[in-house]
Amino acid sequence: MLPVAIQSAIHNTFESMRLLRRPTILIANGILLHLATLAPVWSQLSDPSSPTDLPGGSVLSGKTPLAKGQGAASPSKSNLTPEQRQARQQAKRDAEIKAEEFRMTTFGVIPASDNSPLAASFRKASDNLRDAIADFTLAHARIQHRLKEELPDGVREKWLEKLKEANNTLIAYRSAAADLYASDPTQYAGVGSMLKEMLIDDGQTDRLDHWIDPAKKILDAKTLVDDDVLLYAGYAGFFEGDFDLVRRAWADLQSNQKLGPQESIMLSKIDEIEKSWAAELLRRQEDKTKNNPQVRILTTKGEIVVELFEDDAPESVANFVYLVEQGYYTRKPFFFVKEHLLAQTGCEKGDGKGNAGYGIKPEFDLPTHRSHFRGSLAFPVGMNADPAQGSLSFAGSQFYFSFLPLPLADERNAVFGRVVSGIEILGLLKIVDLTDEETRKDPNVRPDTIIRAEVINKRPHEYQPTPVVGRLPR
């Protein structure tokens, strides 16, 4: 019998899922993201290695001016009476309730009498997803129950293991749903509506890995395609190098001037990106013949394994391996995570202005340089502020994972590795900007962190960088 507190935690977790705007627990896309970001969990109990009040600023701050419609509210010009306003609000609530009832009764629901092979596969995938969510919820509840105590060995690892299993089960469920919907878009319109909502939710959180086939099937059916579907189907193509899907999805958006600035830049450079991707695939085949170093990075959202391109960016790799072996990255926060862009970490202060006390020569201009794609690791380049040393660019301890191809960053930052396992973790990292002073003052903002990093493979020689700014710690 589970302790009452754990039973209560499980109940509260499922109640939280029920309150989400999702069709049902069995088809609740976003559940894993919701559970994985519930606060606090074990990984967010201790403060990151950074002060609470620091000046702002970041090499890759991603800051943009306020978009149209943002800022101070304008005075209302409504001429409605209080009674009319109340009636309008009630009508809005009634419409929302009706829409939610429609979701609950149609999204992902198929008749019990449907015994086709695809329907049977869909039901099995639904059952597997339900069981995986239940297992993960239990692992999560056990951690929540013992937040103030010392956690037994293996509990944290079990939480991460169940998160990974649930994510894989969700991918299989999504694939089964897409196959069923594509077989008869009219008969399985509810399944298609569910897939559409899942695509949009995953697109907003950069969780579009393994979405190529379902996205294409939604586009092929045509009946559910709108601007959001086109936008995130295009992003799914960029995630996995399907550039025909990008062109297909974003062509109408571009012609109707509905692409944002970042998307417009990416589309304008798609031929260049496609060419770079073809070259990257060839180099990845070459990497299989090399003894490239590898590093395991355990984050508060799961394990990521990265391969380092020692032959292409030797000084950057030496720097990274050196810092990992020094234990530098332990408890470093992901201080800047921006959707559709990157997740940055490795700052000593936690605000984007700290480093390890030295800098190395950047390698973005080497003939062997590689381009940014999803899961690429790169060092942002900073400028030395010491007048005695002149204007000198350098790379330090901060690095980032790119979420998408970043052709503009190719021109200034050195890619020195890529994710080879755990790519789905990138979409779970909490969106945050600790370069913003007001955000840092908020006690409720706790970024994801690197728990620890360790070298799991390297070549038989010493890895030690050559500083061009500062010096190595003694």
Image (cartoon, rainbow, N blue to C red):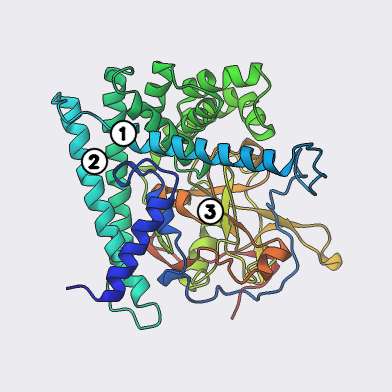
Q: Do the residues labelled 2 and 1 touch (CB within 8 Å)?
A: yes
Dot 3, how many residues are within 10 Å of its Cα: few (below 14), some (14-19), or many (20+)?
Answer: some
Dot 1, how many residues are within 10 Å of its Cα: few (below 14), some (14-19), or many (20+)?
Answer: many
Q: Name the residue under label 1.
A: 108
Q: Are marks 1 and 3 in contact (CB under 8 Å)?
A: no
- Place of residue 179 in the rendered image (x, y in percent of width and height, measured from the top left): 27, 25
Q: What element carries label 3?
A: helix
Q: What element carries label 2?
A: helix
- Reply above or below: 129 against 266: below
Count all numbered tags in the image, as a single digit: 3
Is 466 left or right of 42, judged from the image as shown? right
Q: Is residue 283 visible?
A: no
For residue 314, the mark is 3
Q: In which quarter of the image is the N terminus?
A: bottom left
What residue type is disc 2 on?
Answer: Ser
Mark 1 to mark 3 CA distance (whole Å)? 50 Å
- Place of residue 443 in the rendered image (x, y in percent of width and height, measured from the top left): 61, 72
Residue for point 32% across, 63% down: 11
Q: Name the residue under label 2.
A: 126
- Reply above or below: 170 against 136: above
Q: In which quarter of the image is residue 162?
A: bottom left
Mark 2 to mark 3 CA distance (whole Å)? 47 Å
| Mark nearer the N terminus (1 vs 3) | 1
- Place of residue 247 in the rendered image (x, y in percent of width and height, measured from the top left): 54, 20
Is 286 left or right of 46, judged from the image as shown? left
- Place of residue 39 in the rendered image (x, y in percent of width and height, measured from the top left): 47, 66
Given the current orientation, which residue lies at the most extreme front position? 83
Mark 2 to mark 1 CA distance (whole Å)? 9 Å
Is 262 left or right of 431, judged from the image as shown? right
What residue type is disc 3 on?
Answer: Pro
